[in-house]
Amino acid sequence: MGRKGARSNPFSINSLLKFACFFLSILFVVYFVKTRLDIVDMQEQLMAMEEQVELQRLKNKDAELSLREDEKTLERTAREKLDYAHPDERIFVDISGTN
């Protein structure tokens, strides 16, 4: 009878340990699923950002090419119409009249 009374206690150590293990297992599963979902979300964000980086690289390359063309155009115009030259450059002018 003494044992039967001890077993009828719903808050025995065995019951509490089983409940704690079950609760920790549930927490672990929830944490694992949440972490996995976060990883998938971050991978999607990474792919989107990599696409944005590649698009920006293409835009930068296009802008750089157009800037080079603009610089060449500006330099040619400055030389031909305004008679500009680089500071250490010598300009020879043909004054013979024959072209």
Image: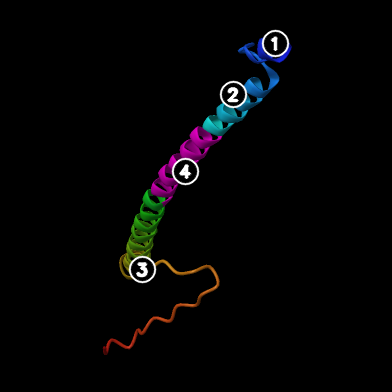
Q: Nearer the viewer, mark 1 or mark 4?
A: 1
| Contact? badges 1 and 3 (CB < 8 Å) | no
Distance CA(mark 1)–CA(mark 4): 51 Å
Mark nearer the N terminus (4 vs 3)? 4
Q: Position of residue 16 (x, y in %)?
A: 64, 20
* Residue to which mark 2 is pinned: 19
| Contact? badges 2 and 4 (CB < 8 Å) | no
Determine which of the numbered discs, if any, sits on residue 1 in the image. 1
Q: Residue at x 69, y 12 (%)?
A: 6
Q: Position of residue 36 (x, y in %)?
A: 47, 43
The secondary structure type at the circle numbered 3 is helix
| Contact? badges 1 and 2 (CB < 8 Å) | no
Q: Amino acid at mark 3?
A: Lys
Q: Is residue 18 above or below residue 38?
A: above
- Kindly indicate the quadrant of the structure image that contains residue 50: bottom left
Mark nearer the N terminus (3 vs 2)? 2
**Depth check: 77 or 45 in front?**
45
The secondary structure type at the circle numbered 2 is helix
* Residue to which mark 4 is pinned: 36
Crowding around mark 1 (Cα neighbors within 10 Å: few <14, some 14 to 19, many 20+) is few
Number of marks drawn: 4
Q: Residue at x 38, y 68 (%)?
A: 83
Q: Which region of the structure is painted magenta?
A: 28-46
Q: Nearer the viewer, mark 1 or mark 3?
A: 1
Q: Amino acid at mark 1?
A: Met
Crowding around mark 2 (Cα neighbors within 10 Å: few <14, some 14 to 19, many 20+) is few
Q: Nearer the viewer, mark 3 or mark 2?
A: 2
State whether the magenta stretch is mostly helix, strand or loop.
helix
Q: Amino acid at mark 2?
A: Phe
* Residue at far right of view: 2
Q: Is residue 36 above or below residue 67?
A: above
